[in-house]
Amino acid sequence: MLRGRHRPLLVLALLATIMIILPLIAGCSTSDSEDGGGGKVSAPGEYSGYSEPLYTGYETTSQYVTSFDGTKIAVDVYRPTGGPDEPMPAVLVMTPYHRASVMDGEIISEVSEPPPIEPYQTILSYGYVVVFADVRGTGASYGTRFAIFDPPEVQDGNSLVEWIVEQPWCDGNVGMVGDSYRAFMQFFNATNMNPNLKCIIPRYCGMDLYDFVYPGGIVNFNFIEVYDVGLQALNMNETKPALDVYPSKPVDSDTDGSMLAEATQEHAANGSLVEVAEQLPFRDSLMESPWGALGYPVPSPSGHLQEIEDSGVVVYNMGGWLDGWGKDTLTFQETLSNPSKLLMGDYDHTQGFENFDIECVRFFDRYLKGIDNGIDEEAPIYIYTTGREEWRFVDTWPLSDQADTPYYFEADGVLSTDMPAAEGSDEYTVDYTTSSGLDTRWTAVAGYASDYKDRADEDEKCLTYTTPPLDSDVEVTGHPILHLYTSVNSTDGDFFVYLEDIDENGYAQYKTEGELRASLRSLGERPWLPDLPYHPSNQADVQPLAPGEVVELVIDLYPISHLFKQGHSMRVSLAGADRHNFRTPKQDPPPTYTIYTGGENASYIDMPVIP
C-alpha cells in the first residue's frame, strides 16, 4: 500500500500518462469506433469520417455520344441531387447487358432497381456521377460486333472518357466499375492510356480467354451455348422473360423508338460466340476478321498487359473462390505492376462482398478525390478462408508460409502424406454420365448461381482417394497441383479432378477442380504470375497417347482457401467426363485409365498447406 506522502507523485504520473495517450488516441483512424464519437474508420466494408453521403437523390438523362468512327453510343447519365452543385468525378460502366431495359412499360436498371451488392446508389450519394453505356452492337447503341471485345469497342471507351471529361458536371477524373464483361472493358479501356481514367474496380475478370473457353483444352460448351443465346436475344432487343431479357430503353430524344429500331437492325450482323469458339480450338488458332487474323490475344487482357501497365491505372481486383475466373483474379494481382489490391471471398460469379458499395466509395475517394483514407496503406491482399469463416490481410500470393505437402494415392483408395511402400495401380473405365452438376462455377458465369450438392453419389461413378479422418485442422490456401501418372488404352482422354471436403456423415462438399485433355499435356513456362503449371495448348503441342504408355499429367486446380476441420477427410475424385459442362468426345467402348501409385510413378496431389 502507498503511504500518503507518495500519492501526489502518483497523481502527477497518471496525469502525464494521460497527456501522452490522448494525442495518440486522437490520431488513430482505422481503430476508432463508429458510435458517434467523431472517430474516422477506414477498413474493408467500413468507412466513416472521411467523406459523407451528402446527396439524397439523382436525376437521369440519356443521349447518344458519337464515337471515334461516327458510331452512336447510347449512354445514361445519373447525376446526384440534393447536395452541393459542383463538378465531381465520374464512374463509367460499359455493358452489353443494356444500360436500362423496358419491362411491361416500366424502365428498369441496375441503378433504379439495384440487384444485391450493386454499388451505384451508394456511389451517387457520395458525390459521383455514374455513366452507363451500351457497348456498340448492343442495347440502343448503333454498330455491330464481330465477336466480343472488338478493337472498335475498346476505342469507344476512350471516346466515352473524352466526352465525360468535357461535360461541366465532371471534374476531369474518371473511374470504372463492373463485373464480368464490364470488368474486361475496364482493363481494355486502360489500354487506351487516357490520363483521365485514373482507377478501375474489375470484379470477376478473365485473363486469357482460351483458358476459359477451353480449360485444359476441353471446350466449356455449356457456358458458351447458354451465354450466346442470351447475348443474341439482348442484342436484338427481344422480349424473353424466361431469360430475363427485355428490350433496351431508347435514349431521351428517340421519342418514337425509330432510332432504337434502326440500331437493332444493325445488330443483326453481330457474330456468334459459338461459331468463333468452334474455329479457335487451340491457343494459337486464328480466324479471319475485319481486322485480319483474329486469335485469343486480341479479345484477352493477356494480349495487352504492357499497355495496361503503361496506363498506370490503379486496380482493385475482386474475385471469388467459386468463380470461373478465380485464378485469373489472382493472376492480374501478381502479374501487373500497376498499383493494385485484391479482395477474394467465398463467391461465385453471381455473388460478392456484402459491403461492396462501401469498398467502391473507399477506393474512388482515394484515387478520384484524393482523400487520404489509408486504403493504399493496407496489405494488398484480403482473403476469406472457408471452414474458418474468417477474413484476413496477407502480403503475398502464394502465402509466404505455404508448405507444399504431397498427398499420395494408394492402391486401396487412400490419400496419405506417406509415400506408398509398394508400387500399385487402379483401373477406371470412363463413365460418360459423370457431372460436376447443373449449377456450377461455369453456369454462374452465365448468370445462374452455383449450387453444389452432396457429391457422394457422383463419387461412386469416379475413382476416389480419401484421407482417414484428420486428427487436426488443416488449412489449404493456394493452388493444389495434381501429378497423375496414368496410361490409357486409347490415343486420348479427358481428365477431371475434384477436391472435396468429407464431413463425419460422409457428405462430400465440392471445393475446387481442374481438367486436362491428355493430348495437350505438354508443359511450358507460364507467361504470367504466379508460377503454375502451364499447358501452351498450341496446335503443335498435340501429343496423342500411345495405348499403354505411362505419362505424367500435371493439373493445377483452381485456387482455394479452406480449412479442413479435424474429423473431416480430404478426397480427390477423378472422372473422365463432365457431361453438363464440358464436351468430351465419346468413345465406344469407353477408354480405361490406369492410375499408378507408389514407386517411380507415384501419383500425388501437392497441397499448399498453411501451418
Image (cartoon, rainbow, N blue to C red):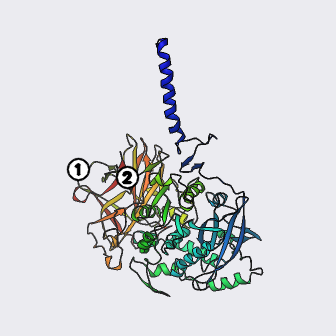
Q: Quadrant of residue 536?
A: bottom left
Is disc 2 surrounded by few (<14), some (14 to 19) or many (20+) residues within 10 Å? some
460 or 115: nearer the viewer: 115
Residue that numbered label 1 is attached to: 421
Question: Where residue 143 sits in the image (x, y, percent)?
Answer: 61, 84
When the figure is inspected, residue 340 is found, relative to residue 48, above or below; the finding is below
User: Which of these two is toward me, 538 or 390?
Assistant: 390
- In x, y percent, where is residue 535? 34, 70
Residue 324 seen from this side: no
In the rendered image, which residue does mark 2 sit on? 399
- Which residue is at 58% across, 41% downward? 33
Three-letter amino acid code at disc 2?
Answer: Leu
Residue drawn where x is 69% and y is 65% of the image: 79
For the residue marked with disc 1, what is the amino acid? Ala
Q: Which of marks 1 and 2 is in front?
A: 2
How many numbered marks, from 0 up? 2
| Relative height, residue 479 to residue 191 (above, below) | above
